[in-house]
Amino acid sequence: MKRTITILVILVIQTIYSQTKNKAADALFDKMYYVEAAKSYEVSIKNGDPSREMLQRLGDSYYFNTQMENASKWYKKLVADYPTEISPEYFFRYAQSLQGIQNYELAKKWMKTFASKQKTTDVRAQNFSLKNTTLEDIENIKPSFTLENLEINTAYSDFGPMFYKGDLVFSTTSDSSYFKTDKYGWNDQPYLSMQLGKINQTQSNVSSKQRFGKEISTNFHEACVAFSPDERTIYFTRNNYNGKLKRDSKGINNLKIYTATAVETANETVQWKDVKEVPFNSDSYSVGHPSISKDGKKLYFVSDMPGTIGSSDIFVVDILGENQYSNPKNLGEKINTTGREMFPFITDQALYFASDGFLGLGGLDVFESRINDGAFSEPANLGAPLNSNMDDFAYIVNEETNKGFVSSNRKTGKGDDDIYSFERFCNQSINGSVFDAISNNKIAGAIVILKNQNGEKIAETVSQIDGKYEFGKALNCNTSYSIEASKDSFNSNTKTVKTPNNSGKTEVPVGLDPALIVRENGVLKIKIGIIFFDLDKSDIRYDAAIELNKVVLLMHQYNTVVIKIESHTDSRADDQYNLELSDRRAKATRDYLISQGIAPERIESAIGYGETQLINNCSNRVPCTEAQHQINRRSEFIITKM
């Protein structure tokens, strides 16, 4: 399988090698005619020139066309014959080519060599040093996609899908019936053009393809499109072409983004008019792979412009109207690496893109970066079967239906690059930690129960020594669950959660209050038994001391807790008498706590309220039972600080 699209999309290859003695092959290589260049370099090696430069260029000729078996063969000889003379990048490419033929164990070895030889900061080196995510982690990602090869795929290259009016626009080299009769030297195929395919009702296949956008077609490449939300403006990638190809000082024809406007004709068909470049294009670097935000305010794209971290990075501009845009902004090192990031697809929930700079299964893998409070999360590899040991890229998805399309040059396809439909199965898991809600200390040994919307138990686990828990069960997305945690000496607590509409883990921390603490109308109180006083007295009795010692114990255990004491009476006495008696009792209670070692400053106040705060209707001259009056005779210990 040859790398048609990833070559169009590779933008500019970093040259880290010198010329060989085979000038004819070098000329082919420099023009990116890798098929013919590889043949010529092999002849030179057979004729006795296995130099470092020759092996590098031969390996690269196969590598850039995703012929990983041949690439690994020549890179193997390169690293064996010239281990100290080559750039670390070649250890990386060798490891990538080994992954491409699924020799993962040997790939890991050479990834570590690459990491050890990198003298500068390189995200790829950090990834492959296996400090965080390992290749085994990616291989063990639960499959959440089913893929189907589309009917429209051919023996040539078909890739780069984009939704348009309920159907699919894509790029292809298969239709050379108009304009495109020349061959592209990179892979000896026709130049790319765009077609429109009809998506069937199940959104699982595409058929009935027809020419799309003939008004914007040239004799060279057009591919990788995006549309404004109203689908009246198209953004597309094209060679730097204005009547003829333009090359930079290195002889490279760069890519540019162009726009055109939809004009409806008398027969209700659409023609694309007013083709123009975006103003941040350049003859000196490439700009391509547009993607428009759902609100139409931002344009994401790929470039190797100045300020690029790696071979190609993802940038964003604000769309200001009238072909005006803000200055391009690099998305930064969270998204971009020293490798290649390309094919961005932005939704209101996530940024999806292809990269070979993060740890993956093959050449380009598809990654997802969720949008949280306007910021991008750490990219996550979407795993197999979406990703393979080859190149997987140009991922688009309908976030509501969880159906979409992705491009790949995996060996099971029909041609060089094929488009696959997919359905994304949304699997969630719930984990978290159980902790003391007062001290924030982790609680081990808590029983944690997961229940469904009907209150039925579907899983149970126990928190570990660090308080963490996890239900080893695949759960539905966009579904409500409840998590109930309990432990001796603590009040149980139930948290409800609705899983998001994307695969992943949902973290639910659960705090438990000590058993003596209750929450009443949002107020924390220390709950103990009734404190009895003798008639008309405020002395602390023995039975009252037993209850108050519970407060003492809790305040010693949680030495930052500050309380206020409130004492109350029932209504069966003179109002002023009750007020004074309750105040004496509140202060006697405070003095007892202080006598037991509680610092005075931890008792914010001790006040009696008499019968002014009855909690039922048993006020003056209202007949009530003794039990009803007893409810009002209470002492309260309200937590004001923790």
Image (cartoon, rainbow, N blue to C red):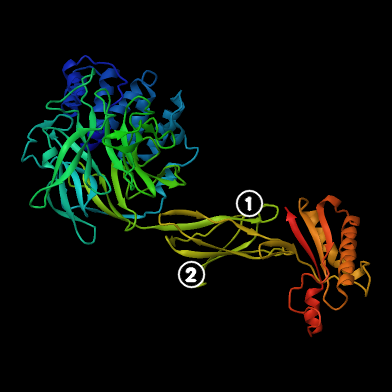
In the image, 190 versus 127, the foreground residue is 190
Q: Are marks 1 and 2 in contact (CB under 8 Å)?
A: no
Q: Quadrant of residue 595?
A: bottom right
Q: Say how many tags the image has.
A: 2
Identity, as a three-letter code, of the amino acid under mark 1: Asp
Residue 306 at x, y = what percent?
35, 24
In the image, 251 versus 139, the foreground residue is 251
- Looking at this rendering, what residue extends furthest in the top direction? 21
Vertical relation: 486 (above or below) 119: below
Vertical relation: 601 (above or below) 448: above
**Mark in the foreground, 1 or 2:** 2
Q: Taking 437 as reference, is 563 left or right? A: right
User: Distance from label 1 to label 2 (Cα)?
Assistant: 29 Å
Residue 453: mark:
2
Residue 627 in view (yes/no): yes
What residue appears at the point 37 percent right and 29 percent down from the top-left corner?
A: 310
* Quadrant showing the N terminus: top left
What residue appears at the point 88 percent right and 75 percent down from the top-left corner?
A: 574
Q: Quadrant of residue 181?
A: top left
Which residue does the numbered mark 1 point to in the structure image?
466
